[in-house]
Amino acid sequence: MSRETGATRRLWKFHGGVHPPQHKEISTTLPVSAARMPARLVLPLHQHIGEPAEPTVAKGEKVLKGQMIARPQGYVSAPVHAPTSGTIADIGDYPVPHPSGLSAACMVIEPDGEECWMERQPIEDYTTLPPSELRNLIREAGIVGLGGAGFPAYIKYNPGHQKAIQTLILNGVECEPFITCDDMLMREAPGDIIGGLRVIQHALQARECLIAIEDNKPQAIAALRQAVAGYDDIEVVEVPTLYPQGSEKQLIKVLTGKEVPADGLALNIGVVCANVGTAAAVHRAINRGEPLISRYVTITGSAVGAPRNLDVLLGTPMRDLIEECDGDLGRIERLIMGGPMMGFALHRHDLPVIKTTNCILAATAKDLPPQRPELPCIRCGACADVCPVNLLPQQLYWYSKHHNLDKVQEYDLFDCIECGCCSYVCPSNIPLVQYFRYAKGDIWTQEREKEKSDIARRRHEFRQLRIEREKAERLAKRNRKKSALKADTAMAERDKKKAEIQAAIARTQARRQAAMKEAEKRRKSFGKEARGPMDETPQQPDNASDNERKE
Amino acid sequence: MLAAIMVLSALAVIFGLLLGFAAVRFKVEGDPLVDKIDAQLPQTQCGQCSYPGCRPYAEAIAKGEADINQCPPGGETTIMALADLLDRDPKPLNPENGVPQEKTVAVIDESRCIGCTLCIQACPVDAILGAAKHMHTVIASECTGCDLCVEPCPVDCIDMAPIEQDILTWKWPYPENRLEKAS
Amino acid sequence: MLRVMIALIPGLAAYIWFFGWGITVNIAFAVTVAVAAEAVMLSLRKRPILPFLSDCSAIVTAILLAFAIPPLAPWWVTFIGVLFAIIIAKHLYGGLGYNPFNPAMVGYVVLLISFPREMTSWIPTLNFLPQELSFAQHAAFIFTGQLPAGLTIDALTEATPLDTLKTNLGLGNTVSEIKSQLGLDEATSMLLSVIPIFGLFGGKGWEWINVGFLLGGLWLIYKKVIGWQIPVALLGSLSAMSVLFYIFNPDQYASPAFHLFSGATMLAAFFIATDPVTAATSPTGRLIYGAGIGILMYIIRAWGGYPDSVAFAVLLMNMTVPIIDYYFKPRVFGRNGD
């Protein structure tokens, strides 16, 4: 049944992987429908990897649906668009979906209910546009990777001076439990996906396209197989279910046998990988002129009465969605954005859906058993057996736990994709990924601090140098002035002057000594250094008057 | 007996010559140790170590005049790094030098600033902008939080504000272990 | 850990069949002492007792150590060994997960070098005992030193096959000579009143105990409780060494089968060397670690001062674990084994 396309494609294997219970069927029984319009939409300016966007409209301004309301800052960045027409009610800090539970800059839109679109400019024939123009349109449409990471998509579609792109992979693997938004998208909008795929293929000039789908989604496979009938260069590849196959590097290995270099990109081996949702968004952006303003979101978990997928406007509060699916907020023990393996717990219910929100898991103890107490690591190596990157999590854990930041890097901590397989199999219930995230954060912080201290050192050294130079200049000036005076002043006058100078010097010295004593009292010997220039300030008026006189 | 003494003396002479030669042949220019120590210090230039800045403290450590536990802003991390570098036993921070505090940044209350430039002269990293009789302001990104500017201010318009955590600087916390915590 | 204990049952059954009930007295006593010592140490270290006791690691340590102690050793031998293993080798290093040396083997080595007489006085297989002891008689002897009337300890004890072989080789006899005297069938041996050391393919009696442990070990691998690397590498290198020297000089060196099925070979391969805490942790590292133990076992058996060699081989390889783990990391995805 699954091999109706004829020749069987050879598949490769990556190391490790696990088979967590799927829980996918619960959210695929109902068809996808558009979510209700909320009272307010909260749009964070930072929904992607890179620099946050910068507002282009002011508070109180009216905006149209699809209008850009914040523009990208810098190369790695993405704009934000108004998901509906309405008024900008506020621009300020609001809680955002982030593991920290902190707030960040957001724009709030009060919908006017008109759904009044801005002028859309669909591209008649994308094949007439050069790839750079297409990439620009994709950037303008605010499209980021919808699979989870949220990396600005247009950057990935730029092969630059790399060798030609051999393979474009559409990722419909969706290996994480509970999440079904890609599955439903593939079932319900295969045409959009293929439309976007053709655009990306054109932008990359890729020779072949593979659409990878895990064998637990037969309906999606059938729908896409039907949609690609007639295209010779697109193949739907059924891959055996294995977590974390949806991870880009692992999927590329499975399909091509090639490994993306640890410090490189898929581009380096002539492969580009895009999520099916991203492809559908590209289709809408190019062929319909609609920017990224909504996405499919899975609302699932035992605390939800009617788990399903909704087509959600970005910025919609999650609470509205949970309620729309007959969810019981009181029953939720852990609210998770993403899946149980890689998602993170949210601190409140009213956070907005952002571009990377693929799933809202309103979990009870039935879905996610509470974290059992962490026992000592017995180095059994179960984690190393399942690590898809072939790391030694037991060693990484040992060094992360004891803050040995040099050693964790020696064991390639930064190659860890945080897939959670190790934590999943650990017989001692050790939250390994948490340790690795902690260690990564610590290393980044240390690097930032190191950078900052280097700047401080340079600035301090420069200041010392400047103070030295100013001292030397003043001394030179005074010497010059002295010799000038010597030449054209009478002896008596000079004596008088000398006495005055002597007195002044004595005065300053006395003052300086007093100041030094006090400074020392206050700040030990450092006061001397810090106050050095100050002590000399009283002399400056003398210098100044001398200068005037000289002129 | 005599032979043994002679052999041992000969060996001592040979090794002495060898070491002497090595000391001349592989002499390192400058004093990299001071640089290495300085690189471990936080460069706040705050003087809490009782030396006028980080580099003088590094020099004092290199000469053996100062101990490695006199830097409150660096805290335990710096002490550990120095202990590692100098192959000494780490020891707790000397409380005479102060206690480690939250990272802060100087903030000038601009309505009260009289433009006296005293803080500008006190700042060890030139992180305060301003001119005489004009309002001053702190370049927050360059401020090391040393608080040396607070005292000279005649109108008390400088405050040390804790650096607020935002999403970009947030990091995952250290996992808590209930069983170990129970102890 | 529970499955490890289940896997020990076939070996234990064979052990009881050949050497009587003494082992069960030792195991029961050792487990009691170990659990008590573990509980005391946990409370001294201010750790919650129940969660840590329920990992059963102390029980497994005690059972493994009991297997290594002769069935007639007095109670205080077991007592000291278990205490040393749990308190010094395990908890003073930080408890489960932090001990660099296999606690059971540390306990065994301490006993072996402190009480060599008690630790090498094994008993011959039951058929060659003047009188079979009951469980109660075993317990009575272990705890009070009282034997049933008419029996002396000398009549009950005998060196192990590996020991006997070593002694005889040391006297200048060849393996075939020894075999002609000590490898006879039971009836003849009884007639000549010698105690045979050679069985069908391994040490007399010991071969079946080893088969028992082998079966249990294979089940553990099948159940993925232990990895295959250490047992395979250990048995592989031990076989390779013994084949090599057996071909080279069959008169001086025992056959590979004798090495594989005598002493604690199988217990070591599947139950002792596979202790994850003290073994190397990467797959390649485990191969090297296992092979190292096998080679050391052969070297010590063939040329060392002790008849069996598991404990020393394991402890020596424990020492090398950090360096093995450091140099034999697996190739990380997308890296070219730098």
Image: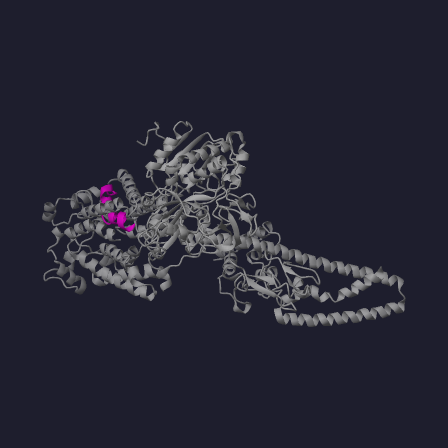
Quadrant location of the N terminus of chain A?
top left
- Residue drawn 17% across the image and 56% down it: C157
Q: Report the number of discs.
A: 0
Q: Residue furthest front?
A: A114
- Residue drawn 31% across the image and 66% down it: C43
Q: Is residue A184 above or below residue A202?
A: below
Q: Is residue C257 magenta?
A: yes
Note whether residue A344 is visible: no
Q: Is residue A93 above or below residue C228?
A: below
Q: Is residue A164 above or below residue A408?
A: above
Q: Is residue C77 magenta?
A: no
Quadrant location of the C terminus of chain A?
bottom right
Q: Nearer the viewer, residue B110 or C276?
A: B110
What is the x, y in percent for residue C161? 20, 49
Residues shaded magenta:
C251-273
Left or right: A432 in relation to B147:
left
Note whether residue C310 is visible: yes
